[in-house]
């Protein structure tokens, strides 16, 4: 957490180095709106596992994983009424030392509850599966997955 002017300066130096030196930068942030602006690829992580990966536009404009959809729903938007309702997750994030069996997101997942708590979510950790574009998601029932 840097003040706005210092943060902008650090980001400018990083982006200049990336361009002039041709280097890759692994940038870890909780700010999806910032990742949307500076990243070539975005990986969304929940309890230490990638649950969705894609281009910033794929992640922000067409999120597939329910956790990603919840994160995107709370990005501030300047236009009032521009975005549908925020997705507020219920429950508390599990202890990272005691990751739930199956899909690690299922205790907080809206799809899990909407679909009647499918056993597959409690027992099988979903693989990160992708599309031809490189957009991939780890969810048994995410939008766009079967």
Image (cartoon, rainbow, N blue to C red):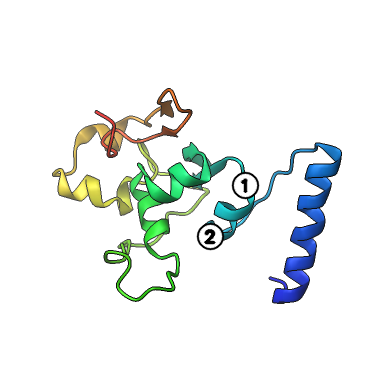
Query: Which label is found at residue 88?
Result: none
Q: Residue at x 25, y 52 (%)?
A: 110
Please determine whether, in this image, residue 17 is positioned above or below residue 85: above
- Figure quadrant of residue 142: top left
Q: Nearer the viewer, residue 30 or 120?
A: 30
Q: Residue at x 27, y 39 (%)?
A: 143
Please determine whether, in this image, residue 30 is positioned above or below residue 104: below
Give the side of residue 39 with respect to residue 75, left or right.
right
Give the side of residue 46 with respect to residue 85, left or right.
right
Local packing at callout 2 (Cα closer than 10 Å; few below 14, some 14-19, many 20+) is some
- Where is mark 1, residue-wise? 39
Outermost residue on the right side: it is 21
- Figure quadrant of residue 51: top left
- Figure quadrant of residue 42: top right
Give the side of residue 146 with respect to residue 59, left or right.
left
**Residue 11's spot in the image, x, y percent?**
74, 59
Distance Cα–Cα, label 1 vs label 2: 10 Å
**Residue 80's spot in the image, x, y percent?**
34, 76
Q: Residue at x 40, y 49 (%)?
A: 61
**Residue 12's spot in the image, x, y percent?**
77, 59
Give the side of residue 10 with respect to residue 56, left or right.
right
Element class at badge 1: loop
**Residue 39's spot in the image, x, y percent?**
62, 47
Q: Nearer the viewer, residue 111 or 8?
A: 8
Q: Residue at x 68, y 70 (%)?
A: 1
- Where is mark 2, residue-wise? 33
Q: Earlier in the sequence, mark 1 or mark 2?
A: 2
Local packing at callout 1 (Cα closer than 10 Å; few below 14, some 14-19, many 20+) is some
Outermost residue on the top side: it is 132
């Amino acid at each position: 957490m840097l003040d706005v002017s210092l943060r902008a300066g650090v980001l400018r130096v990083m982006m200049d180095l990336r361009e002039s030196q041709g280097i890759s930068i692994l940038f870890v942030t909780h700010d999806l709106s910032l990742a949307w602006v500076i990243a070539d690829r975005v990986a969304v992580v929940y309890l230490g596992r990638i649950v969705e990966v894609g281009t910033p536009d794929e992640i922000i404009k067409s999120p597939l994983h329910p956790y990603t959809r919840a994160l995107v729903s709370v990005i501030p938007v300047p236009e009032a009424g521009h975005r549908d309702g925020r997705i507020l997750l219920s429950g508390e994030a599990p202890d990272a030392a005691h990751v739930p069996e199956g899909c690690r997101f299922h205790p907080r997942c809206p799809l899990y509850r909407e679909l009647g708590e499918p056993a597959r979510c409690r027992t099988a950790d979903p693989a990160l599966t992708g599309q031809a574009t490189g957009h991939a998601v780890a969810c048994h029932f995410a939008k766009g997955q079967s």
